[in-house]
Image: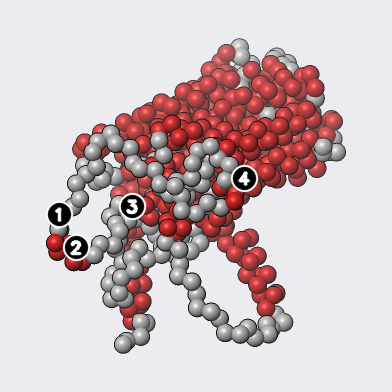
Amino acid sequence: MTPDHPPSSGDGPPNQTPPQSTVHEVDLADVPAAPEDEIVQQPSATNAEDEKVDPSPPPPPPPNVPEEQIPALVVRWYDRGTVIPNLQNPRSYTHRQKMGIVATVAIASFSAPFASNILMPSFPFIGPSLRLGHTGVTLTTTMFLVALGLGPLYHAFLCEKFGRRPIYLCGFSLYTLASVACALSPDGDALVVCRFFQAFGSSAAQSLGMGTIADIYIPSERGRATGFWYLGPILGPMISPLIGGSIYQWLGWRAVLWATAFFGILLLTLIVLFLPETSLKLRAEQANPPEPLAPLPEARPKPKTYYAKQAAFQTYNYGIRPLGTIYHLAFPPIGLAALYATICFGSLYAISVAAPFSYAKPPYLLHSLGISLLYLPPCVAYCVGSVVGGYLSDREIRIAKERYGEDAYPPEVRMRSARWGMPLVPAGLLIFGWGLHRHTHLALPATGAFVFGIGFMLTNGTIMAYFTDAVPGQTASVVAAYNALRNVFAGFISAVTTMALQSGLQEGWFMSIMAILCLIGSLNLEIIQIRGPEWRRKRQERIEAERARTASQAVSTKPHA
């Protein structure tokens, strides 16, 4: 998602090496764009004569004094209309303003799981009206999840060029229009296609949300902010089945989809009012615009192939190039953490898809409203685990600061808080699956789903916060790559779950398979704690070598006076 090489941080003479960031690392080979965190924290160029006169560092600012809020130097037409002001430094927002931004992004992130889960309680009953079987009905969720995986790759790529606010606005405009099209779909095939675009639009918040938090919070404050932001994606699965089951019971499945369209209109209003532009990279570029190019000589007639080549280039630049974001998963700490979180996320959808079909069969024979109520236990657990996980993650960082120093602690210390949740994930899957398999009282599978929800959030919330620290300045790109992996896998698991249950594989055995995968995947987090610092050190050495080579080439190609 970061297409361009980072600009030099100084304007000194050719033989002067650009100043290097002392806070964050950036891999030019992986993500050539200017990192958001690094842009703000790079030291500014200092006059050499002033250094000789007063070499001592400036005194620290007085404690508890808020940073001065400087209005944004550039305000585009689509930046207007916000109640929260557009500031040049997004980290200078007040606590109340930051919470307003986080709340808006959380509601935006609520939209995707809201639309994804709102039809699930009615899955066993809507097939005949759509002329679809159980697998065909599940395909509406499978395609939705595939779009949720692919969409963030493009949203994050475009946000590096245009900032975050226009991507939010365009994405949720598409979500609203696609929701209307879903409600008007004549059959199941049309609904599957419209659901794809509905998910593509709502996925804007899936990758940009974490990047927005990284824009406005310093690293030591992100864990708790991440926990509150993640309440949006978690409340979606909690509230949407209740709304969907109730609406379907009284008004039918089309009214369920009209509810998503009305929510899209409300969400667009909130984004316009309470979500200003926060991209640190964009603000830095606006503060230091490039010098105007020299006037071009008189244009010559363009060759016949010029426009065809331009079209091919733009197709590659905006159609193929964003997929390169997946390369972030090749960095071992990111790839291993994302793989474990992906298996857990697939298990979440295995529970969500298996529940309505299992509860609609004997001995339970529940209707859509009763099924929707049984989505509450895991979703309450998601909320509790999100907040508790953020607190535990930040606590590990505070302990590490006392031990290693303010800026010397390794980001891997966050993974220690995930140990609280790792055993709960497979345990919850086993209780849920075998409770349904043995046709026990509804309380047992509901308890299993609750245990799984606590464990899922204690691990997944920590991993999300770790992404911002392990590869600083590239949060949106990393989260987009992770979302692509987990949503495509969850879509695959959704389809496999339905087919497995229809083929005779009972819930107990299927959930046992998922539990074993989660248990094996949890070893990845232990490997990261052991090898993570070494992997990051080697990566930083490659970065510095690349920077030195780039600086050397720049000096050697400079014409001598």
In percent of width and height, residue 496 lies at: 65, 38
In percent of width and height, residue 7 lies at: 41, 64
In terms of secondary structure, where does tag 3 sit? helix
Which residue sits at x=35%, y=29%? 392
Amino acid found under the numbered disc labelled 1: Ser
Amino acid found under the numbered disc labelled 2: Asp
Drawn side of residue 91 relative to residue 130, left or right: left
Q: If you read the primary sequence from the N terminus, does the residue marked by circle 2 or circle 3 appear first?
A: 3
Amino acid found under the numbered disc labelled 4: Leu
Mark 2 or 3: in front is 2
Q: Are marks 2 and 1 in contact (CB under 8 Å)?
A: no
Drawn side of residue 561 relative to residue 33, left or right: left
Q: If you read the primary sequence from the N terminus, does the residue marked by circle 2 or circle 1 appear first?
A: 2
Which residue sits at x=69%, y=75%? 307
In terms of secondary structure, where does tag 2 sit? helix
Mark 2 or 1: in front is 2
